[in-house]
Image (cartoon, grey):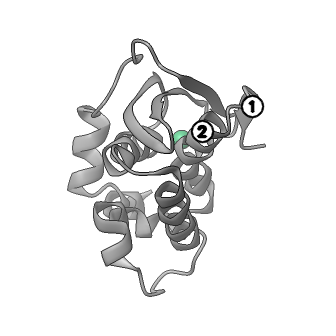
Amino acid sequence: MNDLRDLYQELILDHSKKPRNFGPLKGASHQAEGYNPLCGDRYTVYLNLDGERIKDIGFAGSGCAISKASASMMTAAVKGKTTAQVDEIFTHFHKMILGKPGDPVDEPKLGKLAVFSGVCEFPIRVKCASLPWHTLRSGIAGDGKPVSTE
Ligand code: ZN
């Protein structure tokens, strides 16, 4: 598991130890639950939507360092964004983590989320990194269905 050390970059470690926007959001207008049975990651994403804009976001739950850092960095990346912008960021993020090692990363579009580019080398971690995003999108859609990566 030596290669995992490269994956757990400083930023990922920092976010997994001190997750941002952590804890249930009071007065959330939308929320969704997500579960990754492969790893045991389980999170709830809380949203306060103002029309199409994410006014506030929080998450709660537990899981591995990758899933927690991904949820933390996701909440920081999408706060204040419109749902259309969230879709765009997610599209780039998803393409990156499902890509091949060495594929070019769209850093201007992804910002700090680009640190997850190493995840594509670890297929089992792809679901950890994508779970918070699938959960967020379910929350925005408001269908109330729990998300499972299986
Ligand atoms: Zn995980």
Q: Quick check: 34 left or right of 11?
A: right
Which image quarter: residue 79? top left
Secondary element at image label 1: loop
Q: What residue type is labelled 1?
A: Asp
Most foreground residue, 91 or 98: 91
User: Can you say whether 42 is above or below 10 in the image?
Assistant: above
Residue for point 34% across, 47% down: 73
Considering the image in quadrants, where does the C terminus appear? top right
Dot 1, crowdedness within 10 Å: few (<14), some or many (≥20)?
A: few
**Image quadrant of ligand 1?**
top right
Looking at mark 1, is its residue's CB closer than 8 Å to ligand 1?
no
Of residue 137 and residue 119, the one placed in the foreground of this image is 137
Residue identifier under label 2: 140
Residue neighbourhood size for the residue with mark 2, other residues' Cα within 10 Å, grouped as few (<14), some (14–19), many (≥20): many
Name the residue nearer the viewer: 5 or 9: 9
Is the N terminus in the top left, top right, bottom left or bottom right quadrant? bottom left
